[in-house]
Image (cartoon, rainbow, N blue to C red):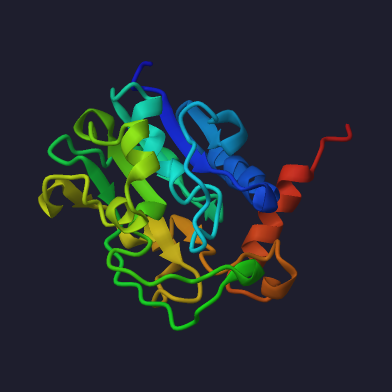
């Protein structure tokens, strides 16, 4: 696939279907170059994603995200994103940060949530490098360990801590604004926030109607649903 096409894989969970749709809309309407957005739906990954759901797994895509390089035939670059996000900037700006000396590039969060549960009563796990894997620029050729066999058998910590790499020197850094943790991260100027991450729960859930940046997500949803009547 030509690398002038921006490849974005998005974690999909049927409980958050509207979040996926709004995220895709937010990406496409701001992109200055062609973007292919692919949802990682477990119903479409039966041959390559067979591990049983773990009690600490809060979404369907907790582990399927790591199949991104395999789905790209371990060639070129791709972006992975959780679905509970809202892109406010041109995704091409993130794409242009690719650096071939790295296998993965992400925001290096120091995120230690205080609560034990999040949306829909799901467990809020705490571990080193938490949320690093929620937005990843992946240099697919440099991720050969992420075969279906490995992704289906490795521990969650091994996957999310990037233990499939030969050292943290292969993990590059992108600006924090590309994975801004709503209601957690210190306030950033609006001009520096490129992507909102509703990591504990977004305004599409009743219990989070008043979360930070709820108005921005609702406005995006309404724009997605609008039609030209003339």
Residue furthest to the top: 1
Residue furthest to the right: 229
Instruction: Mark yes or no: residue 113 visible.
Output: yes
State left or right for residue 51 relative to residue 153: right
- Identity of the residue drawn at 25% across and 38% down: 98
> Which part of the image, by quadrant, shows the C terminus?
top right
Q: Residue 110 appears at what percent x and percent y?
A: 29, 72
Q: Nearer the viewer, residue 60 or 200?
A: 60
Instruction: Mark yes or no: residue 41 visible.
Output: no
Q: Residue 152 appears at what percent x and percent y?
A: 39, 40
Q: Residue 181 appears at what percent x and percent y?
A: 45, 67
Q: Residue 15 appears at what percent x and percent y?
A: 68, 53
State left or right for residue 35 relative to residue 2: right
Q: Nearer the viewer, residue 207 or 156?
A: 156
State left or right for residue 123 relative to residue 120: left
- Identity of the residue drawn at 32% across and 47% down: 154
As drawn, 76 above or below 87: above
Q: Nearer the viewer, residue 204 or 155?
A: 155
Q: Nearer the viewer, residue 79 or 59?
A: 59
């Amino acid at each position: 696939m030509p690398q002038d096409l921006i490849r974005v894989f998005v974690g999909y969970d049927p409980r958050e279907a509207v979040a996926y749709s709004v995220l895709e809309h937010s990406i496409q309407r701001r992109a200055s170059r062609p973007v292919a957005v692919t949802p990682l739906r477990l119903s479409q990954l039966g041959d390559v994603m067979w591990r049983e759901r773990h009690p600490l797994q809060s979404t369907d895509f907790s582990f399927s995200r790591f199949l991104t390089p395999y789905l790209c035939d371990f060639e070129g670059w791709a972006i992975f994103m959780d679905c509970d996000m809202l892109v406010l900037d041109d995704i091409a700006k993130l794409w242009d940060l690719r650096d071939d000396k790295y296998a993965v590039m992400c925001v290096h969060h120091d995120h230690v949530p205080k609560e034990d549960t999040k949306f829909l009563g799901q467990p809020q796990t705490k571990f080193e490098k938490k949320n690093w894997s929620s937005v990843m620029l992946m240099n697919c050729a440099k991720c050969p360990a992420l075969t279906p066999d490995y992704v289906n058998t490795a521990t969650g910590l091994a996957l999310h801590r990037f233990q499939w790499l030969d050292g943290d020197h292969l993990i590059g850094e992108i600006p924090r604004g590309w994975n801004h943790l709503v209601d957690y991260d210190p306030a950033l100027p609006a001009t520096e926030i490129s992507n909102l991450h509703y990591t504990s729960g977004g305004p599409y859930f009743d219990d989070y109607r008043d979360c930070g940046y709820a108005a921005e997500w609702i406005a995006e949803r309404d724009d997605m649903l609008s039609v030209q009547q003339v």
